[in-house]
Image (tube, rainbow, N blue to C red):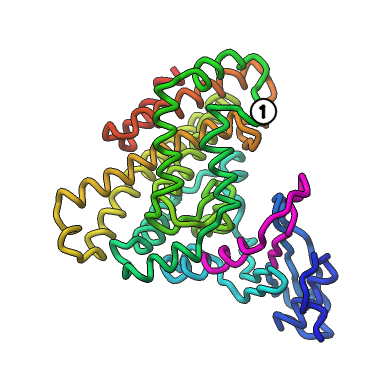
Amino acid sequence: MSAFSEFFLMKPDDVKRYAVEVLHRFDPDEETDCTEIGDGNINYVFQVRSRRDGRSVIVKQADKLLRSSGRPLDIYRNKIEAQTLQLESRLAPDYIPEVYHYDETMAALSMEDISAYKNLRKELLAGRVYGHLAENISTFLAQSLLPTTDLVLDRQEKKRRVQFFTNPELCDITEDLVLTEPYWNYKDRNIITAGNEDFVRTFLYEDEALHAEVGKLRNAFMNDAQALLHGDLHSGSIFANEQGVKIIDPEFAFYGPMGYDIGNVIGNLFFSWANRRFAAPEEAATAQALEDTIRSLCDLTARKLAAKYDELVTFPLYRTEGFRRSYLDGVMADSYGYAGTEIIRRVVGDSKVMEVTSVTDPAVRIPMERALIKMGIFLIKERESGLDGDTVTRAFRMILA
């Protein structure tokens, strides 16, 4: 009987044995090093590397408990992540690490080591804005999202996938932390920077018109099973270098409105831009590169989704220009709305981003947070007004001014 025939939480020495006995990636007598490289709250991520020739593998194991609080979690999410990576690698092979093995018993996913690529959030914070970002990310979005809709898929297959990718626990986190608590702090978990309490109350807690629009976005997130989403596509889930990008960590994957993924990427880029403008105003060239990236990402995504639509959608009713235009416009409107909810939740919610938290001077932090909140509100309220890359970047420049 194998040591890995029943679930237990592996330590580095266990993972080294696992890579030999289960994955067969290394010889039994081969010397390896194992390092825990993850910093998340619900998984453990290990890198196993050969001392002989540098070959390596990543092993990601799901925990049955939330690391911070000990709350029980369903490890089915690990199976969803493995299936999502395998599906996305068929649709967008240039952007997904290769999956070697999924072990349902150990809730362990083993895949290609992409350590040649770096965490995009950290790269942008260090001032490294790769010129290919908008091109590559927009291509990934178009290739991975539209083909999973029932505009393209067989209807029965789409319904089977919706059932398989039902991910209630992790969707519940999003429904609360992103789409409820920043506007109605009913669990008292929001973390407001001292000096911004009145601003948050006025602009977020007491704005009924804003609440109505967020309610529509929340309802769509919960009920519009449009496409298979990554579900947590922020700049910490994207890794980049001069050659390109890789997308990881789709454990929040489920069937929802495709604008949620698009909006998450767009929203997170605003943190990098705001950080440069407020915390490093002397780095004008970096701020300009970030603005250009956001503008291009918005417009290229809309253009590539339209091209993918024309390439793949054959059903006559969906080929009519009226439906096509309504559908694509709706996706981009959702994208801007969810970009707004992502910006706001990272500023006032309990899950922050380092572009904001690294700014410790209140004289800088307070106006930066207010600018971001105003931008988030603009994106939510104006999402159906025909926004594009130029409109949204110009709007943020005006807020900054």
In the displayed structure image, the side of residue 128 where residue 70 appears, left or right: right
User: Was residue 91 drawn as part of the magenta stretch in this picture?
Assistant: no
In the displayed structure image, the side of residue 329 where residue 366 appears, left or right: right
Please tell me in which quadrant of the rendered image residue 330 appears. Answer: top left
Q: Residues within 10 Å of mark 1 (few under 14, many from 20)?
A: few
Q: Secondary structure at mark 1?
A: loop
In the displayed structure image, the side of residue 130 where residue 353 appears, left or right: right
Foreground of the two, 205 or 51:
205
The quarter in which the C terminus is drawn is top left
Please tell me in which quadrant of the rendered image residue 218 appears. Answer: top left
The residue sitting at 28% across, 60% down in the picture is 308
The residue sitting at 62% across, 37% down in the picture is 353
The residue sitting at 42% across, 38% down in the picture is 217
User: Was residue 81 drawn as part of the magenta stretch in this picture?
Assistant: yes
Region of the chain picked out in magenta, as a range: 59-84
Amino acid beneath label 1: Asp
Examine the rendered structure and indicate whether residue 270 appears above or below residue 43. Answer: above
Q: Position of residue 142 (x, y in %)?
A: 36, 57
Examine the rendered structure and indicate whether residue 8 appears above or below residue 249. Answer: below
Which residue is disc 1 drawn over? 188
Examine the rendered structure and indicate whether residue 387 appears above or below residue 119. Answer: above
The residue sitting at 77% across, 79% down in the picture is 5
Examine the rendered structure and indicate whether residue 105 appears above or below residue 189. Answer: below
The quarter in which the N terminus is drawn is bottom right
Q: Position of residue 232 (x, y in %)?
A: 54, 49
Q: Position of residue 180 (x, y in %)?
A: 53, 34
Foreground of the two, 180 or 82:
180
How many labels, in total? 1
In the displayed structure image, the side of residue 57 where residue 173 appears, left or right: left
Q: Position of residue 119 (x, y in %)?
A: 61, 51
